[in-house]
Amino acid sequence: MAASLRRPSFTTCSSSPTDTDDEGVRGTCEDASLCKRFAVSIGYWQDPYIQHLVRLSKERKAPEINRGYFARVHGVSQLIKAFLRKTGCNCQILNLGAGMDTTFWRLKDEDLLPSKYFEIDFPVIVTRKLHSIKLPTLLVAECVLVYMTPEQSANLLKWAATSFETAMFINYEQVNMEDRFGQIMIENLRRRQCDLAGVETCKSLESQKERLLSSGWESASAVDMMELYSKLPRAEVSRIESLEFLDEMELLEQLMQHYCLCWATKGGSDLGLKEITY
């Protein structure tokens, strides 16, 4: 996966197993990772990232093993940094058999990332590492899902719910579209050759929440925009209301009662994602 110069990308590539000894070779990744994790835990070198990828073994490693890994890590690191400085980081790195190596993040901390960074290893190792490094993801859709068919939007929501371990989805679009005001909105848009293909999912706040929950999201909330408007900081409301005179407050209320803000979360219990509210 290519990235433009000086915009580093982190890519992991899986290699195909080719012989019967692969299991033994893969086992060396676990051994080396545990040794590095232990050495870091007792202060041989600083690596704040390895704890997120490798468990701490209860077995104490011998001093000669720890010093050997210290020399290995230090020596490889010094050569990598020397190459990066000579090239001004306008280069790429291919880390073959990368395992649970954390070089990418340590270089990032020192502002020494190359233009491209690739890691190659066995599929099972790559999969394990990707699972560990997936960061929380926020997806935002403003007046997007309503232009998809219900099936299409459901597929998108299910894909998002299954693709990310820890995530939040924010959706802003129409609601309460079955009443007379909602029908007028639909008719006006149709006159402009704009069809709301997914309007049937916009029946109510409950239907909006249900579509999220049925797609695999663990929690879902929704408020119409009038309710949200009532919760805005009063100083800000007073400021914007003083900008121009509004003589049809009822029209504003009708309009805002037909749009909503919905949000759903998955995972992130340690972060308190389910507690997010407006």
Image (spheres, rainbow, N blue to C red):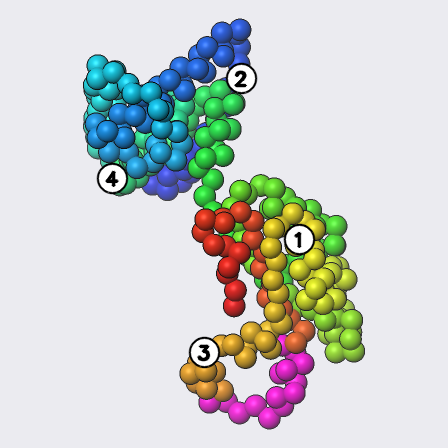
Say few, some or many: other residues with alpha carbon within 10 Å of mark 4 (under 14 / 14 to 19 / 20 or more).
few
Say few, some or many: other residues with alpha carbon within 10 Å of mark 3 (under 14 / 14 to 19 / 20 or more).
few
How far apart, in angstroms, are the residues tagged by discs 3 and 4? Answer: 41 Å
Position of residue 27 in the picture relative to residue 46 (left or right): right
Query: SS for tag 1?
Result: helix
The mark nearer the N terminus, 2 or 4, is 2
How far apart, in angstroms, are the residues tagged by discs 2 and 1? Answer: 37 Å
* Amino acid type at mark 4: Glu
Closest to the camera, between mark 4 and mark 1, is: 1
* Amino acid type at mark 1: Leu
* Amino acid type at mark 2: Ser
* Amino acid type at mark 3: Pro
Q: Nearer the viewer, residue 106 or 31?
A: 31
Q: x%, y% of residue 166? A: 51, 46
The mark nearer the N terminus, 3 or 4, is 4
Q: x%, y% of residue 2? A: 45, 35
Q: Nearer the viewer, residue 72 or 2?
A: 72
Numbered badge on residue 110: 4
Say few, some or many: other residues with alpha carbon within 10 Å of mark 1 (under 14 / 14 to 19 / 20 or more).
some
The residue wearing badge 2 is: 16
Query: SS for tag 2?
Result: loop
Above or below, comparing residue 278 to residue 135 in the picture = below
Residue drawn at the location 45% of the way across and 16% of the way down = 26
The residue wearing badge 3 is: 233
Magenta highlight range: 242-256
Q: Nearer the viewer, residue 262 or 83?
A: 262
